[in-house]
Image (tube, grey):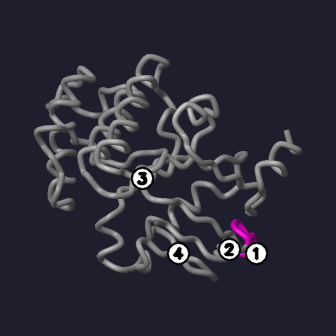
Amino acid sequence: MIEICNVTKRFGDFVCLDQVSLEVPDGIVYGLVGENGAGKSTLLRLIAGVYRADAGEIRIDGKKTSSVSAKQKIFYMPDRQYYDRNATPLTIGNFYRNFYVDFSMEDYRGLLEMFELEENALLDSFSKGMRKQVFIAAAICTNTKYLLCDEVFDGLDPQIRKVVNGLLLSAVEGRKLTLLIVSHYLEELNKICKEKGYLHLGKILTEEEWNRLL
């Protein structure tokens, strides 16, 4: 379980997250909804250990996010992927295989083939959507317990979004993956999410409070 308890994050004088508390149960797809600047991406980075909270605490299965045991259970896929200019899908797979002991190269290559992505082509020659597919494949094949995805559907055409939905749901159901996903594609979130949280101006809202803003 992911437990977020009274977490505050500031950037200078700006309070990005203000005493945020929520729980993400195991084995579900949890959607995080909010407008631009609400703090969704910042919260994912805090859970992943990229940022440190100024106040409050985040625990993964009872362990602080700074602990090695917690970090090994998480794969974080940001909205913008970073890679070496000479990177190929194959080198991306080899990179993550060095960090995640349960990474399945066989499954990864199978997903690349399914997406019709050439494993030795330069990522810089791919479209935004194709690069996103490479990292989605890598994220699934790390076989971590928790997968944090920021705008996973951005840049994907409708047919590929449908395929990705199926892959993610299959992982959730098959190996009890817990997926925390941030997306502006509310229609896609509604298709796959069992639970949702609502962020507005750095604060957690109830669904009723959120609906009153619409």
- In this rendering, the answer to whether 205 lies above or below 211 is below
Q: Which residue occupies 45% across, 53% down?
A: 148
Q: Nearer the viewer, mark 2 or mark 1?
A: 2
Question: Type of residue at label 3?
Answer: Gly
Judging depth in this view, the residue of 28 and 97 nearest the camera is 28
Q: Nearer the viewer, mark 1 or mark 4?
A: 4
Q: Which residue is mark 3?
A: 27
Q: Nearer the viewer, mark 4 or mark 3?
A: 3
Q: Nearer the viewer, mark 3 or mark 1?
A: 3
Q: Secondary structure at mark 3?
A: loop
Q: Position of residue 36 (x, y in %)?
A: 70, 46
Q: Sequence order check: which comes first, mark 1 or mark 4?
A: 1
Horizontal side of residue 2 vs 38, given as left or right: left
Proximity of marks 1 and 4: CB atoms separated by less than 8 Å: no
Q: Which residue is mark 2?
A: 10
Question: Type of residue at label 4?
Answer: Ile
Q: Secondary structure at mark 4?
A: strand
Identify the magenta region.
12-18
Q: Sequence order check: which comes first, mark 3 or mark 2?
A: 2
The CA span between labels 2 and 1 is: 7 Å
Pointer 4: residues within 10 angstroms few (<14), some, or many (20+)? Answer: many
Q: Secondary structure at mark 2?
A: strand
Q: Which residue is mark 4?
A: 58
Q: Which residue is mark 1?
A: 13
